[in-house]
């Protein structure tokens, strides 16, 4: 049985299934449940070279990602409450895989639940690589939900 579970959320349908599985695991083992949403900073590589690009665009995108994360975590808390589970939420900024692993270590997580991919083709590529990174590089049992 697991006593401290972390679910990685991104708002996709797959991450909602991961949340459902995490809730099931938490209820089954009377475990503590935590959720992480990672807002990935906008990379300024070639954009910063474009004279028409404005820094405000990056700041606005980061605000949008933060608001999306707040909504995802709020909805997850509501879902958990409806299922008799208290959810502890974490909003992080940076590389999703590294943030998940860092929080898992910090919080002494013994199960990570993560979706296999995100909501768009780009998210599928990025989140798929996040789940792959987490499975490959961490020491914690990890469940990938499809």
Image (cartoon, rainbow, N blue to C red):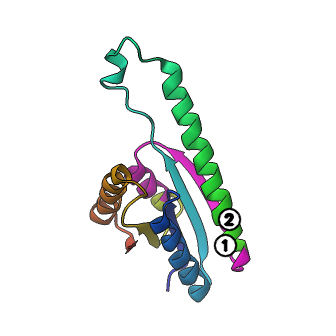
Marks 2 and 1, how far apart at CA: 5 Å
User: Which numbered marker is on residue 80?
Assistant: 1
Give residue 6's position: percent from left, percent from top.
51, 67
Residue 48 falls in image quadrant: top left
Give residue 65's position: percent from left, percent from top.
54, 42
Q: Secondary structure at mark 2?
A: helix
Residue at point 53%, 47% (across, down): 92
Look at the image and say whether residue 90 sits in the magenta stretch: yes
- The residue singled out by tag 2 in the image is 77
Residue 86 visible (yes or no): no
Residue located farthest toward the left when viewing the structure as drawn? 136
User: Which numbered marker is on residue 136?
Assistant: none
State the extent of the magenta-drawn residues as a range. 82-103
10 Å crowding of disc 1: few (<14), some (14-19), many (20+): some
Look at the image and say whether residue 101 sits in the magenta stretch: yes
Camera-nearest residue between 125 and 143: 125
Label 1 near label 2: C-beta < 8 Å?
yes
> In the image, is 112 to the left or to the right of 30?
left
Residue at point 45%, 42% (across, down): 40
Q: Secondary structure at mark 1?
A: helix
Give residue 23's position: percent from left, percent from top.
58, 78
| Residue 46 to residue 83: above or below | above
């Amino acid at each position: 049985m697991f006593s401290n579970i972390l679910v990685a959320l991104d708002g996709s349908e797959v991450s909602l299934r991961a949340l459902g599985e995490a809730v099931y695991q938490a209820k089954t083992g009377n475990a503590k449940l935590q959720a992480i949403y990672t807002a990935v900073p906008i990379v300024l590589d070639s954009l910063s070279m474009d004279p028409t690009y404005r820094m405000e665009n990056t700041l606005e995108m980061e605000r949008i990602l933060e608001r999306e994360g707040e909504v995802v975590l709020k909805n997850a808390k509501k879902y958990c409450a409806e299922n008799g589970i208290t959810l502890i939420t974490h909003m992080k900024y940076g590389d999703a895989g590294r943030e998940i692993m860092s929080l898992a270590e910090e919080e002494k997580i013994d199960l990570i639940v993560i979706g296999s991919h995100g909501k768009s083709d780009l998210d599928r590529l990025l989140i798929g690589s996040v789940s792959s990174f987490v499975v490959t590089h961490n020491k914690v049992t990890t469940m990938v939900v499809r």
